[in-house]
Structures are given as structure tokens and as C-alpha cells.
Image: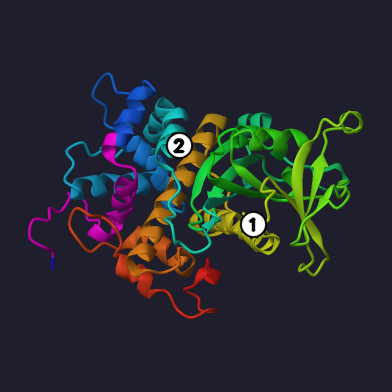
Amino acid sequence: MPRSGWRKPESDSRLSDAVSVGVLMRVFPPGVVDEVIAECGRTRKRHRSLPARSVAYFVIGMALHADGSYEDVLALISDGVVWAGRADAPRLADKGAISHARRRLGVEPVERLFRRVAVPLALPGTPGSFLAGRRLVAIDGMCLDVADTPGNDGFFGRPGVMKGERAAFPQARVIAVAECGSHAIIDAVVGPYAVSENAAAGGLLDRLEPGMLCLADRGFHSFTAWQQASATGADLCWRVRSTLKLPVLEELPDGSWISEVFDSKTDRKHEHGARVRVIEDGREPAGPYRLITTITDPGDGPAGELAAAYAQRWQIETAFNELKTHQRGPRKVLRSGTPELVLQEIWGYLCCHYAIRTLMFDAATQAGQDPDRISFVTALRLSRRSITQQGAFSPPLSTLTAATSSPGSSATRSAS
């Protein structure tokens, strides 16, 4: 039975179908969306059936309802806005009108909206989030298949495969920074596959902040990247290739040692290097691996603790899996046919993932639990279907925490 004060929209959609708009409005408030749109000069100059704000929510809604048609997603956005008591609900339109509205909005407002809202979530005491007062973050990359159109192919490029053939679809490359304790993606760059991970990561490394401890796999290490990242004041703990020369300059009591890294043999000859601490860990089945870190004092970060913290780097892999396998759908190709709309769509996916992860973090915090114990699959399903109170448009946090169970259950992190 509907509660007192609820108004039913003109369509036959159920209130539970409109929850996605509430989840988005909760994390991306209309006022913030309007500010970003105005800053980008996309404020409407005349009345339109698809206002810029609604189109922004539509772009994020596409990522929440990846299987829905344009018309279906717009209907959910429209009904959700009506249920929320907003007077500016978009009118239904066909696919051509929606595509035109997306082009009118462009990429910049959705990207800027993500950058405005996506901030670290973890609090002091959140498990797996801090080491020696430093916030653990990880950097890594992923690729997404995009629609096989001439424009996408020319802009993004595609990987090669065996015997000189090319992959079936062009690919976009996403390099991201994720907070390890919450799995929230807090920064990203999006671009063509043809741009390497190392080249694309430069913009992210410049935006690291003091108080962070950045974890990275060996593919990201170069002398230039190390210097660029450490110049921000953030601390680093990166894995390096076993072939990198790391002479022992000073042995430390915890088994680590002080060494130097160089950009070239010439720099090594002239001693123009960077001082690092080396930690060798032999717990992997494949054999020992080496980490280098800017934390040179063992009392500030013991070797064992740093090696254990490096294992948290896999949390960004989990976040990528959530976005690619569950949110987008396995082996699904992004729907946009032009480079600009592909970029817009990817930023919408990043916004959507952040919204769901914020919901999960709030649920875990209220229950006093580790965010890793909340199932992303459950949160995604509830974000699409459930609602319990007028105006909040948020899945019940108690439902999320009730989904936690003992290790090995399908409701735990292993399911996500």
C-alpha cells in the first residue's frame, strides 16, 4: 500500500523501478549537477524537453541499467524525478532526440561532475584503509570494448592479436586511482587504447596528495613516473622488475635496505638518482618480488607491514571487475557510436560505480563492519530495484548489511 504523501507518476512504472534516480541524486545532488553544467556553459538557453540536468542523470543511469534501451532508461529517470517531487522531469523522447541531447551536453560536465564528487570515503579505523596514518590508494588500468564504428576505430584504436589480425572491437583505456579500503574510484583519466598506460598515467600521478600511500604494480615504474609521483608529497610503494639494479647502500634492521634508482646509465655515473628503500618479499608462489618505497625509516613503516599493505593493491582490480563484469555486464560493448559519446558514457560508468560504492560504505559504517563484507552484487541489485522511504530514494542500508555472511558466502566480497 502506498504511504501517505506519495504521488504516482502518469506512467505505470512502480516506485521500486525509480530508485536509481534517488541513488544518483543522493550522491550527485541536483544543485551540484546544476553548478557543473553552468560552469561548462551547458545551461539551457531555452526550454527543452530534455534539460541538461536530466541528461546528466540519464548518462549515469545508462551505466546503472546497462541492459536498458535509451527509452527505458529515460522513462526510469523521468518517473524517478516525479517521485522525488521535482517539477523539471524530462519528457519522454525517442532515441534520436536522446542522442542529440547527449551530444548537446558533451563530455566535460559528466567528467567534471565525477571529479567534483568522487573523494576518498574511508575514515580512521576503516579496515585496510591506512598505514602509519597514510591513506592507501592504488593505481592501475583497464580497457573497455567500444562500438565498432569508423569514428571510434580512428580515435581509440584497437589491440593487435595473433597473425597480424586486429581485435574485434576498438578499446578505450581507463587509468584510475582507487581507495583500497572502500574500493571507490576517486580519480581517473580516459583516452584511446593507443596511448600506453605509462603515458596516460602522468595526469593522475600529478594529482596524488600528501598523506596518501600509493601502491602500483611493476608496469607503472619508471624513473620519470617515480619522480613525478613523489614530487606531490605522497608516499609510494611500487613493485619493480627483478632486473632493476638496486645496490645495497645501507642495510636496515628489518631486512630492507637503502638504495638508489636512476633514469639512465649516464645519470648513475654522475650519481643523479633518487634515494629509495627496498623491500624484498618472498611470499608469492612465483618467488620473491621487490618493492621500493619513499618511506625510508623502518620505524615509520616496517618492511612486513609495507609488504602486507602492497597486497591491498588488488582492491583496484576488484573495483574494475565490479564495473566491467557486474555493472556493465560481461563481454558487453559500450553502446555509443562516436568518440565524444563513448568518453561521456565511460565517465557515467565511473560516476555510477562511485555512487554504489558510497552507498555500500555508508551501510558498512552504520553497521560497524568492514566495507569488504558488503556484496557489490547485492548493492547493485538494490540500487536498481528497492526503496523504503519517501524522498530518500536509497536502498535500505540494513538490507545491505544483512547480506553479509561468513567467508565463502555468495553475499561476501568473493561474490563481487
Badge 1, how many Cα within 10 Å: few under 14, some, many 20+? few
Left or right of residue 353: residue 228: right
* Label drawn at residue 299: 1
Q: Is label 2 or label 1 in front? A: 1
* Residue 392 image position (x, y, % from top left): 23, 55
Q: Which residues are magenta?
A: 2-31
* Residue 50 image position (x, y, % from top left): 30, 33
Q: Residue at x 63, y 39 (%)?
A: 172
Residue 368 sits above or below residue 103 on the image: below
Res 68 visible = no
Q: Residue at x 39, y 47 (%)?
A: 61
Q: Nearer the viewer, residue 273 or 73?
A: 273
- Residue 251 appears in which quarter of the rendering? bottom right
Q: Residue at x 49, y 66 (%)?
A: 372
Q: Nearer the viewer, residue 156 or 30?
A: 30
Task: Judge whether residue 379 is colored magenta.
Answer: no
Residue type at mark 1 is Gly
* Residue 131 image position (x, y, % from top left): 56, 57
Res 102 visible = yes
* Label drawn at residue 320: none
Residue type at mark 2 is Arg
* Residue 118 image position (x, y, % from top left): 43, 43
Task: Residue at the far left: name it.
Answer: 4
Left or right of residue 86: residue 188: right
- The first of marks 2 and 1 along the sequence is 2
Between the C-alphas of marks 2 and 1, the distance is 35 Å
Q: Secondary structure at mark 1?
A: loop
Task: Judge whether residue 25 is colored magenta.
Answer: yes
Q: Secondary structure at mark 2?
A: helix
Residue where numbered disc 2 is placed: 115
